[in-house]
Image (tube, grey):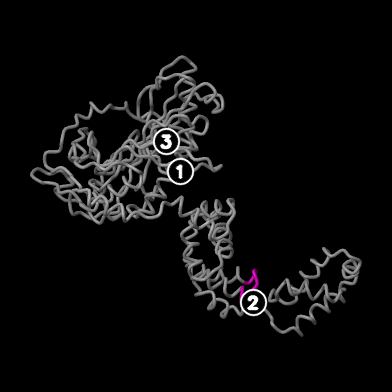
């Protein structure tokens, strides 16, 4: 269980009536390079602790760093995608602070000379409104190691019996993307925060610079929140909720801090500038440490690294590699597929845009691809806490399943049984259908006999249909389908029944 809190809060609606929320979002992104930022150590996630380290990333005396060129190119591409200016000359700095998972006792980062600056990202909100978030900077740095606190109930250092440090993550290339103060969001501030991080994640995934897996920490958000009285010019004191690692948590953490700040200010108190920890289970933040200002880190230029000076030709070459922006791509696909806004939103919520695109390319109709991926498979994913891509079903499997339905071999019920078999690893849709003997009865004589038998066995229902109560035919259809063991076309059964009953 998380540490309990007694912090007072006020209702969110009351807080935003009295105060204007101001946010600053800092998103850290681990780049998907094969090696670390300043050495040749591997970056694979999940390796045995302290097996991906060397004298450079452990900060041993005499070890000299070398900049990862691929990481620099990724940083430039991120900056360009965020409409930033790219520095003609920049350099690294040492950010000095003691922390157990900082083996050098400083972090190699960028301070006043970032590689990218002065950009923006347009964010689409749930109702279609677009909110522009201005980007102050995107700079390169290295990640820290990871501390594991053992023996306590919270996983934090308080109450732990001892701590272990894994330096595998130390030195992994990071890009930190820092917004300017986000003003004017009002009561939509939590929604804007979530939408910004979601839009940024989609963009970084399209750039193929990171796996952006928030649950693994390869993308994480520090959410700065302050309040100022409505109409006031001076910004309030901020708090920084650290390492929030899901879209839902970003929204909840911002909302909670707005309510907590309002309660402190309403009571005549003042906000302490500090870091805060987010507790997913209880939905609250708790105090971390006093928040340092830049001067406290004693930044100075890194003497062991040469400046980075990308040529304008290299910048334009990298600009030519940028993919179609995700928002524009979604609008193009939505138009091509003929989806409504609601249908496209369902597809996006299911995380199925790319997989549906592949499925349509494999031969399925857009309607069928949406039906299976954002319908049946999304339902299973939600029930089991998985992604739609976690079931071993491939785009070509769904396209093949659609073909079996449109060719008349399977009805919808049979197709679901076939999908069960594919998920269970029984083979392709055709192999599953063959093995399970699933195929619509094509013998009209057998179907007509079953229809006649059901009519004869249900004279009262048959008479209702003859009398014009057409909806009563549903009961007869169900009995025919049962008699045919589900291996009949329900539309054809309905047609035969109505013909027989006039």
Q: Nearer the viewer, mark 2 or mark 3?
A: 2
* Pointer 2 residue: 408
In the rendered image, the vertical position of residue 430 relative to residue 366, given as above or below: below
Decide whether residue 465 is among the magenta residues.
no
- Residue 84, given in percent of the width and then of the height, sits at 32, 42
As helix, strand or loop, the secondary structure at mark 2 comes to loop
- Crowd band around label 1 with a 10 angstrom C-alpha radius: few (<14), some (14–19), many (20+): some
Viewer-side residue, 173 vs 106: 173
- Crowd band around label 3 with a 10 angstrom C-alpha radius: few (<14), some (14–19), many (20+): many
Q: CA distance from mark 2 to mark 3?
A: 54 Å
Viewer-side residue, 282 vs 321: 321
As helix, strand or loop, the secondary structure at mark 1 comes to helix
* Pointer 1 residue: 247
Q: CA distance from mark 1 to mark 3?
A: 13 Å
Going from N to C along the chain, the mark reached first, 2 or 1, is 1
**Residue at x 33%, y 35% (from the top left corner):** 136
- Residue 394, given in percent of the width and then of the height, sits at 47, 67
- Residue 279, given in percent of the width and then of the height, sits at 44, 37
Kindly indicate the quadrant of the structure image that contains residue 46: bottom left
Going from N to C along the chain, the mark reached first, 2 or 3, is 3
- Residue 143, given in percent of the width and then of the height, sits at 26, 44
Give the position of the N terminus as an image quadrant. top left
Q: Which residues are magenta?
A: 406-414
Kindly indicate the quadrant of the structure image that contains residue 238: top left
- Crowd band around label 2 with a 10 angstrom C-alpha radius: few (<14), some (14–19), many (20+): some
Give the position of the C terminus as an image quadrant. bottom right
In the rendered image, the vertical position of residue 100 relative to residue 372, given as above or below: above
* Pointer 3 residue: 278
Q: CA distance from mark 2 to mark 1?
A: 43 Å
Q: Residue furthest top?
A: 268
């Amino acid at each position: 269980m998380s540490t309990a809190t007694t912090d007072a809060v006020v209702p969110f609606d009351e807080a935003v009536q009295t105060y204007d929320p101001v946010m600053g979002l800092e998103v850290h992104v681990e780049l998907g390079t094969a090696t670390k930022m300043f050495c040749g150590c591997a970056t694979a996630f999940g390796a045995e602790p302290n097996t991906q380290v060397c004298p450079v990333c452990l900060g041993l005396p005499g070890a000299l760093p070398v900049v990862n060129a691929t990481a620099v190119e990724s940083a430039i591409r991120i900056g360009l995608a965020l409409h930033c200016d790219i520095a003609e000359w920049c350099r690294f700095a040492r950010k000095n602070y003691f922390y157990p998972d900082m083996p050098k006792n400083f972090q190699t980062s960028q301070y006043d000379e970032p590689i990218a600056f002065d950009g923006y990202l347009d964010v689409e909100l749930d109702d279609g409104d677009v909110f522009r978030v201005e980007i102050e900077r995107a700079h390169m740095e290295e990640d820290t190691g990871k501390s594991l606190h053992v023996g306590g109930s919270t996983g934090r250092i308080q109450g732990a019996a001892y701590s272990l440090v894994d330096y595998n993550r130390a030195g992994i290339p990071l890009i930190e993307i820092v917004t300017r103060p986000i003003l004017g969001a009002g009561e939509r501030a939590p929604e804007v925060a979530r939408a910004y991080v979601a839009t940024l994640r989609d963009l970084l995934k399209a750039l193929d610079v990171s796996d952006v897996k928030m649950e693994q920490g390869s993308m994480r958000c520090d959410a700065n929140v302050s309040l100022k009285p409505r109409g006031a010019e001076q910004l309030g004191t901020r708090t920084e909720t650290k390492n929030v690692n899901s879209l839902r948590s970003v929204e909840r953490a911002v909302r909670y801090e707005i309510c907590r700040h309002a309660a402190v200010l309403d009571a005549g108190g003042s906000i302490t500038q500090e870091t805060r920890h987010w507790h997913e289970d209880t939905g609250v933040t708790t105090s971390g440490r006093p928040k340092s200002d830049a001067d406290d880190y004693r930044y100075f230029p890194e003497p062991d690294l040469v400046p980075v000076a990308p040529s304008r030709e290299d910048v334009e070459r990298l600009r030519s590699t940028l993919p179609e922006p995700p928002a524009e791509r979604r609008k193009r696909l939505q138009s091509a597929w003929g989806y409504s806004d609601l249908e496209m939103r369902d597809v996006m919520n299911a995380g199925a845009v790319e997989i549906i695109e592949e499925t349509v390319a494999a031969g399925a109709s857009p309607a069928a691809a949406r039906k299976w991926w954002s319908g049946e498979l999304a339902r299973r994913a939600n029930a089991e806490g998985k992604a739609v891509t976690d079931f071993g079903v491939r785009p070509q499997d769904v396209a093949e399943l659609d073909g079996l339905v449109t060719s008349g071999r399977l009805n919808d019920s049979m197709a679901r049984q076939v999908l069960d078999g594919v998920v269970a690893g029984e083979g392709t849709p055709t192999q599953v259908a063959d093995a399970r003997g699933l195929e619509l009865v094509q013998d009209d004589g057998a179907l007509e006999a079953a229809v006649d038998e059901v009519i004869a066995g249900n004279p009262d229902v048959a008479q209702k249909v003859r009398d014009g109560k057409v909806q009563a035919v549903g009961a007869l259809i169900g009995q025919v389908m049962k008699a045919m063991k589900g291996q009949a076309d329900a539309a054809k059964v309905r047609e035969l029944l109505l013909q027989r009953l006039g």
